Amino acid sequence: MMNMRLARPEALVDINHLSELTRIQDTGDAVEIGALVRHAELEKNPVIGCHASLIQQAERLIAHPAIRSQGTIGGSLSHADPAAELPVLAVLGDWLFRVSSAKQNRIILAADFFLSYFVTQHASRAYRRQLAETLLNEALHLAARQNSGERRG
Ligand SMILES: Cc1cc2nc3c(=O)[nH]c(=O)nc-3n(C[C@H](O)[C@H](O)[C@H](O)COP(=O)(O)OP(=O)(O)OC[C@H]3O[C@@H](n4cnc5c(N)ncnc54)[C@H](O)[C@@H]3O)c2cc1C
């Protein structure tokens, strides 16, 4: 947002030190992806490659390596750019978002999270803690779509 001069915030909160948000874990029935996981990590992570390879295919289409080395999945989804790759995957795959504020924790289905382009359900003071991607249904669903002759572009 700041790179493109779309936002000039008066204050910034640096969440880069929240190491618990950098994890990718296979919990058995889901793959949980921390909001601070960067595109470059998603592109090469073996858990993602094994259970959600479509994410890796999409990642390779995002900008270029310098952008992918810094941009995060949480930032990409929160930004809700209609031209971005990950929000589309999230809605198609019925991903679940874990959203936390000081007062409450919520799980939100991707289709409900995105209200319009660049507009999400974030309460202004809430921030994303972790994203959980539903695993088996999503992977099977997407595999079926790919095999039905769908084309890119
Ligand atoms: C030149 C350029 C080309 C790009 N090309 C593509 C492309 O081809 N495809 C594509 O999909 N994307 C593209 N992007 C987007 C990029 O890949 C990042 O995903 C995106 O910029 C988000 O970056 P970030 O993680 O640094 O988030 P930021 O820019 O820091 O944040 C984006 C927004 O999300 C909010 N936010 C960030 N993290 C959280 C959180 N954890 N919880 C709540 N809110 C949060 C911020 O407050 C801000 O409003 C491009 C970006 C640039 C600069």
Image (cartoon, rainbow, N blue to C red):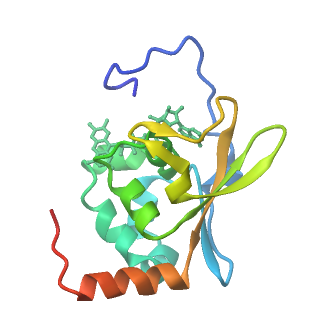
Above/below status of 141 relative to 105: below
For the image, the number of numbered tags is: 0
The N terminus: image quadrant: top left
Residue drawn where x is 27% and y is 82% of the image: 146
Q: Residue 41, position in %: x, y?
A: 45, 60
Q: Residue furthest right?
A: 103
Q: Quadrant of the C terminus?
A: bottom left
Residue 8 at what x, y percent from top left?
45, 14
64 lies left or right of 80? left
Residue that extends furthest to the top in the rendered view of this protein: 10
**Residue at the image point whose x is 37% and y is 59% from the top:** 88
Relative placement, left or right, of 105 versus 53 is right
> 34 or 138: nearer the eye?
138
Q: Height in image: 4 above or below 108?
A: above
Q: Which quarter of the picture shows residue 61?
A: bottom left
Residue 21: image location, x then y, percent: 65, 52
Q: Classify the position of ligand 1 by quadrant: top left, top right, bottom left or bottom right.
A: top left
Measured along the vertical axis of the image, is residue 79 above or below residue 99? above
Left/right placement of residue 131 relative to residue 67 reads right
Question: What residue is drawn where x is 28% and y is 47%?
Answer: 83
Residue drawn at 35 percent across, 49 percent down: 68
Horizontal and vertical percent for residue 49? 42, 78
